[in-house]
Amino acid sequence: MKYIGVVVAVILCLAIHNVVAIDSVNYEYESDSEKIKDLSLNYPAKAIELYKQNATQYLLRSNEDTMSAYTSALIAASNAQNIDLIEEIIGLIADDRLAPFRESYLFTVINVIGVSYTMNMQYEQAIKTHKCALNYTNSHMEKMISKVNLAITYRMYNQPALSYQILQTVDEAILNGRRAAGVLVEKGNTAMVLGEFDAAIRAYKAARVQYINGGHHRNAMRVVVHLLGAALLDERYELFTASRKKLDPQSSNYLTENELIYLKWLDLIYPSIQDNQISEMVVTYTSDNFALFVEAGFQAPVESLLKKMKAQHIVSDDPSAANVVMKINDKLAHGWCDGDK
């Protein structure tokens, strides 16, 4: 399944309706729907489990709390890329019983549908849906979030120039620390695809500072993983070594499985770069995990580093073709996007 690793930026863009990216599940909540909301980003499996425990009672309720719970569960399902649950929840949200409570949530719902398409490599549908989401924005903040998601999709769709143009229209001044950091991460990602490695390093460093200042240490750790790839590509080996040391032994608690696999790849290829000869271990590990690197948003640095090593032949020319196991229904936003608002 598709997961946009950085995606710190995606976390930024899902965080609407005061969904807070938390670093711990040890917190007291007023209701289960509030807990689902806060778990939906960093702990989607826990959020989904809690949602399913309460799913029957939500079917019996028609109020804003139910609409909020469904929206948060949708975010969790998208983050976990649980396609069946995504489609099920969209059906529940579209039910007439929730019509009086749905309007203020539609931007978030459509935005998450777009993110889900992007994560599943259904880029054309994602672009269409994110453009639709722009019609449902109710603030400058939501407009900025929608633009960033559109930029992410264009980058993942191998159109980094369009991504760059969109990012230049994002007013970081109106974003809070975490969201501004997410924009910086996406600027770094786009710079990586464009081969502007020094610019990527600056963006990742700035994002990390923003996350640390805001107390978002989990995301700060995740940015370091992306910084490491940029450092190797820019031949900043001292920066690579120093940054690698910042990922303490507990970092496995903060990084996703995909990020840990990419991190291991960086650790493996670094000696090969130093020796100017790619090892058989790197060849095997790359071949075994390249589809995952694409899923996690690491295709650009992996391919660029392999090109530097004159070893790009070891990976598939079109890894995405066989990577989508199951397509998401391409009409999930049909009722809201295929006509006038």
Image (cartoon, helix red, strand yellow):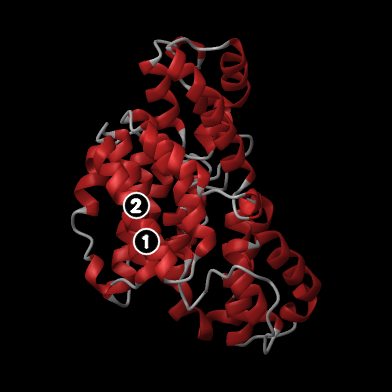
Three-letter code for the amino acid on which mark 1 is drawn: Val
Q: Front-most of 10 and 243?
A: 243
32 vs 338, left or right, is: right
Task: Count residues near mark 1 (Cα–Cα under 10 Å), then give few for <14, some for 14-19, many for 20+.
Answer: some
Residue 151 % position (x, y): 31, 49
Residue behind mark 2: 205
Q: Residue at x 19, y 58 (%)?
A: 169
Please name the residue that numbered disc 1 is placed on: 209
Q: In the image, which disc is placed on residue 223?
A: none
Identify the residue at horizontal 30%, vertical 77% (top origin).
139
Looking at the image, residue 182 lies above or below residue 161: below
Quarter of the image with the N terminus is top right
Of 335 and 87, nearer the camera is 87
Q: Position of residue 173 (x, y in %)?
A: 23, 71
Say which amino acid is labelled 2: Lys
Circles 1 and 2: CB atoms closer than 8 Å = yes
Image quadrant holding the C terminus, namely bottom left
